[in-house]
Amino acid sequence: MSMRSFAAGLTRKISGKIAGATSVERLATSMESMLKEQERQGKRLETLENRDGEMWRKVVGYAVTFMVGAVLAFLFAQIGL
């Protein structure tokens, strides 16, 4: 094996390792970006899910308030107030 072929083979190996490291770095950056986007989507989804729950709590609250008011009005009407 000549010195030139050894150097050429070594250069190819080093170039391959550098290209592999660059690919891994790009993959890590891409995964980090995907994680951030997933976190943002999770927060948006949680907001949307809570919106319906809050609406129903308000509706139930208004219904209970109405019922209590109706009962009190009936009782006051019965005692003549």
Image (cartoon, grey):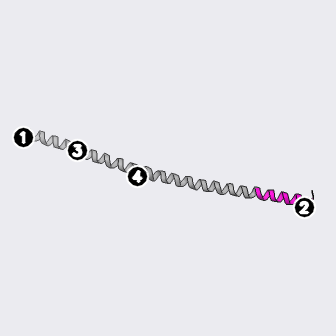
Q: Which residue is mark 3?
A: 65
Q: How far, Cα to Cα, is label 2 from label 4?
A: 65 Å
Asked if labels 3 and 4 touch by Cβ distance under 8 angstroms, the answer is: no
In the shown orientation, is residue 48 left or right of residue 62? right
Count of marks overlaid on the render: 4
Q: How far, Cα to Cα, is label 2 from label 1?
A: 113 Å
Q: How far, Cα to Cα, is label 1 from label 3?
A: 22 Å
The residue type indicated by label 3 comes to Thr
Judged by depth in the image, the label closer to the viewer, 4 or 3, is: 4
Residue 80, which numbered label?
A: 1
The residue type indicated by label 4 comes to Leu
Q: Earlier in the sequence, mark 3 or mark 2?
A: 2
Give residue 13's quadrant in the image. bottom right
Q: Earlier in the sequence, mark 2 or mark 4?
A: 2
The residue type indicated by label 2 comes to Arg
Residue at point 20% right, 42% down? 67
Q: Which residue is mark 2?
A: 4
Dot 4 crowding, Cα within 10 Å, few <14, some 14–19, many 20+: few
Q: Which residue is mark 4?
A: 48
